[in-house]
Amino acid sequence: MQNRQFFTFKFKSSRLKEFDYNINLTFDEAKENNEVIALFDSQMLRSIRDIHKRKIDYGHLENLHKKRNGLRKKEHSDENAIRIKEIQDEINNILFVPNT
């Protein structure tokens, strides 16, 4: 099993102030705005997951990566592109750590 990076939002303080410290956006929107950062797992992230009762099934996560990578190796098709995006969205949802 590989060590996977987790993701969280990172905002400039001026942006937080502009939105009265209440920014609501999706992972994809934040990624487009370069407001997503990658972090390796740590005690802090494990504690946040414990508080929010978020368990990670690492076996399932690895299977998703394998499926996605297998589809990437196949000939390009609209169907494969859609399935890759769905799998990547599920991976992002698992690895995204809100409220950090």
Image: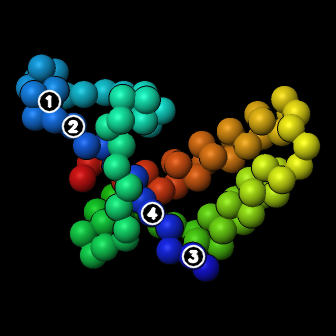
Disc 1 from disc 2: Cα separation: 7 Å
* Residue 82 position (above or below residue 73): above
Q: Position of residue 95 (x, y in %)?
A: 47, 56
Cβ–Cβ below 8 Å for labels 1 and 2?
yes
* Residue 67 position (above or below residue 40): above
Disc 4 from disc 1: Cα separation: 25 Å
- Nearer-N-terminus badge (3/1): 3
Q: Residues within 10 Å of mark 2 (few under 14, many from 20)?
A: some
Image point 73% across, 43% down: which residue?
Answer: 84
Disc 2 from disc 4: Cα separation: 19 Å
- Nearer-N-terminus badge (2/4): 4
Would you name the residue on which mark 1 appears?
A: 16
Would you name the residue on which mark 4 appears?
A: 5
Judged from the image, the secondary structure of the residue bearing numbered disc 4 is strand
Image point 76% across, 34% down: which residue?
Answer: 82
Would you name the residue on which mark 2 appears?
A: 11
Judged from the image, the secondary structure of the residue bearing numbered disc 1 is helix
Name which residue type carries label 4: Gln
Q: Position of residue 42 (x, y in %)?
A: 31, 73
Q: Position of residue 1 (x, y in %)?
A: 61, 79
Judged from the image, the secondary structure of the residue bearing numbered disc 3 is loop
- Nearer-N-terminus badge (1/2): 2
The quarter of the displayed image where residue 50 is located: bottom left
Would you name the residue on which mark 3 appears?
A: 2
Q: Is residue 60 visible?
A: no
Name which residue type carries label 2: Phe
Image point 35% across, 61% down: which residue?
Answer: 39
